[in-house]
Image (cartoon, rainbow, N blue to C red):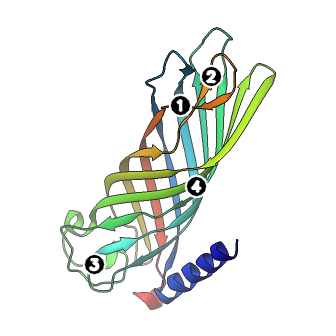
Amino acid sequence: MMRKLVFILLLIGWLKAANAQFGIQVSTGINYFQDSKKEAAVSPSNSLHYSIGPSYWFRLKNLRVEFNPALVFDYNHSEYLKNDFGFNTLDEYNFALNFPILIYPLDFGNDCHCPTFNKSGQFFEKGFYFLLYPSLPYSSKKVTIGDSSFNKSFTGFQLGIGAGIDIGLNKNWTISPGLMVSKFFKDTYALDSGTKTLVEDSDNRYRIDLLIRLIWFEKSKR
């Protein structure tokens, strides 16, 4: 516990020293499940997720490599395929520390600490980026079958790649939509059709996301 507290304090100090800017991160997407043990477990379908949370923005001093860590709440709802014991659902409540890393290949040498609106150059050249997206989610799963429910919690790991573009709204605000494909590791739980409980299984989850970041820059930092 003490190590976690020290880590959080160091992270906050690092962000403050880096002149981090405040923002909001919102995403929604579709979950895809892959199961190689169909005879032992049931994989959910019709699975959607929604997430929102505050974020910070900071970047390398002389290169367009930017960081936008966020602490988000994420809700997933999945419907299992109908099986011998009827129709059921999976609800997941996640708290995640996301750490998006953005690389701007067409504007890599720009050292302006400012919204895209203020950067010289063409719209696409200064706004397009590639995205690397590591995340540490803590997940609480709840399976409901009729009047019964079962729960299980664990910490996993998510890694995504994608691309997006910054759109400068004015001298202070930038909105940044992007698309991302990600894979979950240690997300290895499914519903066993015999015991009707969550069990370890070879489920692999993939996700396609629409990600929207909104960032505010102070005038004094431009």
Residue annotated with mark 4: 52
Q: Amino acid at mark 3?
A: Lys
Quarter the N terminus occupies: bottom right
At mark 1, the secondary structure is loop
Residue annotated with mark 1: 201
Residue 91 tag number:
none
Between disc 4 and disc 1, whose residue precedes? 4
Residue depth check, mark 3 versus mark 1: number of the one nearer the observer: 1
Question: Dot 3, how many residues are within 10 Å of its Cα: few (below 14), some (14-19), or many (20+)?
Answer: some
Between disc 3 and disc 1, whose residue precedes? 3
At mark 3, the secondary structure is loop
Q: Amino acid at mark 1?
A: Asp
Q: Position of residue 54 (x, y in %)?
A: 58, 65
On screen, residue 164 versus residue 39, left or right, reads left
Q: Is residue 167 visible?
A: no
Q: Determine the residue positioned at 32% across, 79% down.
A: 118
Q: Amino acid at mark 4?
A: Ile
What distance separates the C-alpha of mark 3 from that of mark 1?
Answer: 49 Å
Residue annotated with mark 3: 119
- Whether residue 98 is situated above or below residue 23 in the rendered picture: above
- Whether residue 96 is situated above or below residue 171 in the rendered picture: above
